[in-house]
Image (cartoon, rainbow, N blue to C red):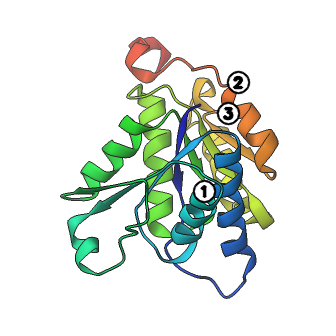
Amino acid sequence: MNRLAVYCGSATPADPRYIALAGEVGATLAQRGIGVVYGGGRLGLMGALASGALGAGGEVIGVIPEALVGGEVANTDCTELRVVTGMHQRKQAFTDLSDGFLTIPGGVGTMDELWEAVSWAQLGYHAKPVGLLNAFGFFDHLLAFNRQMIETGFIREAHSRIIIAGEDLGPLLERMAAHRPHTPIFAMKASDL
């Protein structure tokens, strides 16, 4: 994995562990020679992620919609800052520029990005690993909901392991690097669906 799209929040939670985590993720990726592709913001976890990676000498590509540049939240310290017209172009750039996806804590936008990466993998628009760093148990309920969708039959067995979840970044990155693509829906026959 040369680059990972990292999905995270632009908010700054009251609990300082989240900002520290984002900085550590950025630094760890840089130390492993993995570039960061992210939302291009300078605030919250996004800003901490970029600062951590840049501080450790890593590559950081920010992808930000024009509307957010005007709001003065763009991180001009990035190795490269790409300004796009909207969110669809932003998410396509994340997919095009990365070798996989890593989600750390965040809000609605982060969840939108995660589920799109999962959905696109399930369909066959990409065959890249989708990692979820469940730091501090933040995603416990999301993982339980994902299990419920599998057990109920809304997620096929062939796609039940798309989300690669872990509580520690090092082992999670190793599992992502060892990822083997599943059979996507586009390659299935109607009888398999």
Q: Amino acid at mark 1?
A: Ala
Q: Is residue 163 visible?
A: yes
Q: Which mark is residue 53?
A: 1
Give the CA separation, mark 1 to mark 2. Answer: 23 Å
Q: Depth check: 95 or 97 in front? A: 97
- In the structure shown, which secondary structural element does the residue marked by tag 1 occupy? helix
Q: Is residue 148 visible?
A: no
**Residue that appears at 64% across and 33% down:** 160
Residue beneath disc 3: 176
Task: Classify residue 8 as left or right of residue 138.
Answer: left
Q: Quick check: 1 above or below 66?
A: above
Q: Position of residue 164 (x, y in %)?
A: 68, 39
Label 1 crowd (10 A; few <14 / some 14-19 / many >=20):
many
Q: Which mark is residue 178?
A: 2
**Residue that appears at 81% across and 40% down:** 171
Q: Residue furthest bottom?
A: 14
